[in-house]
Image: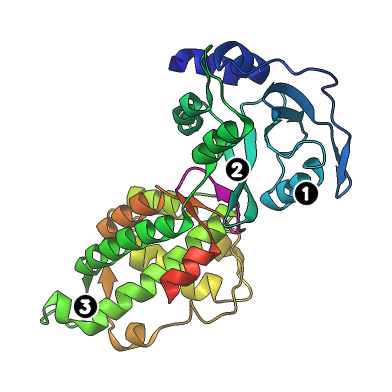
Amino acid sequence: MKRNIFNQYITASDFKGLFVSEMLWNNPTGATQLPEINIDNTTFHIEQIAERKGFQILHCHVEQIPSSAICKKIDHKIRKNAENYICIFILPETLHHLWIAPVKKVEKRNVVLIEYDSLDKAAFLFEKIESLSFSLDDNLTILDIIEKVQSAFLINSEKITKDFYAGFKKEHSNFAKFITGIDDHIDEKENKNKQWYASVMLNRLLFCYFIQKKEFLDGDVNYLRHKLEWTRDQEGEDRFFNKFYKGFLVNLFHDGLNTPKHNHEFEKIYGRIPYLNGGMFDVHQIEREYANLDIADEAFISLFDFFDKWHWHLDDRMTASGRDINPDVLGYIFE
C-alpha cells in the first residue's frame, strides 16, 4: 500500500475500507454491534467492521480517547465477545485515533496501544500495515493471524530500558563536558564532583520531563524546550543576560519546584509551577560549595534532543512504538 492511500483512509477515519479493500480482511458476517460496555460512567458502543478466521477488527467513536487504565477495563469486558481483536477508538472530526490489541507474553495478557493525532505521528502505524495485511491466496488459521498481529504489536520492555539507559549514559558523559566551575583543573573523567553534579542535574531533568508531559509545568508539555528557546532569545545587553542554567533553571528548581508559594513576579516568568516536597530540588551540597558553577546551553540542547526521541508516560501503558518511557524505566535509571 502506498503511503498516500494510507493517509487518505486515516484522514477519513475509514477503517472498514482500509482493512477490507486494501488489507484484504473479510466483511463481518452476522450482527456487527457488540453489547454496550459501561466503564466509569462512560458507555462504549463498539462495532465489528472486519474479520479474518474469527479475529475481529472493531471500531468505536468516543468523546475522549480512553486512558491505558480504561483500555484494560474495556479488554476485560470485551473478551466475552471478542477474544482476539484490534479495536480502534476514533475522536470524531479529528485525526486523533487509538488502536489497542491484547497480547500475551509468558501467559500474561496485556493491552498494547498505538495512539496518534496527526499523519506524521501515524507514520509508525503505516510501517506495521504490511504485516497486518493478507493476499488473495492466503490460507491462514486463526493461530497464524494471532501471531501476525501479536508480532506487530508486541514490545520488548527490557530492550527499551537498555536502549534508553545506553543513550542516557552517553548524554551523561556529554553533559559533564559543559559544566564549569567544579574543580576544572581535574581531568573531566576523574572529576568525581563534576560527574556527581551531572547525575544530579540529569535526574532532575528526567523527572521534569515526566511531569511536563502531564502538563504540570504551566500546562506546557514541552515546557523545558520552550523555556530554553525563550532564554536564548532574551540574551544580550540589558536583556535576560544569563544563560539557561543560571538565568532560569536554578530558580525553577530552588524557588519554584522546591517552594510552596510563588509570587506574581515569579509566575510572570515561570508560569504555574507545582511544589514538590521530595528533596530532589533542594539546594545541593555541590551548589553550595562551588559559587562559580555554570552549565552551557549546549548541554541542554543535546539532552533535550535525546529526551524528545522518546514517549513519556506517567502510567504503565504499553505501546508498540518501542520508544516508551514510564516510571519503571525512571526507577531503573535512578538506581
Q: Are marks 1 and 2 in contact (CB under 8 Å)?
A: no
Residue at 72% in and 46% down: 71
Q: Nearer the viewer, residue 63 or 59?
A: 59
**Which mark is on residue 7?**
none
Judged by depth in the image, the label closer to the viewer, 1 or 3, is 1
Q: In the picture shown, does residue 172 fall above or below 131?
A: below
**Quadrant holding the C terminus:** bottom left
Q: Are marks 3 and 2 in contact (CB under 8 Å)?
A: no
SS category of the residue bearing label 1:
helix
Residue at 60% in and 58% down: 316
The residue beneath circle 1 is: 76
* Secondary structure mostly taken by the magenta-highlighted segment of the chain: loop
Q: Is residue 241 visible?
A: no
Amino acid type at circle 3 is Gly
Residue at 79% in and 41% down: 78
How many angstroms separate mark 1 from mark 3 (CA)? Answer: 56 Å
> Taking 118 as reference, is 2 left or right?
left
**Which mark is on residue 181?**
3
**Quick one: label 1 or label 2, which is nearer the N terminus?**
1
> Taking 43 as reference, is 219 left or right?
left
- Magenta part of the protein: which range? 314-322
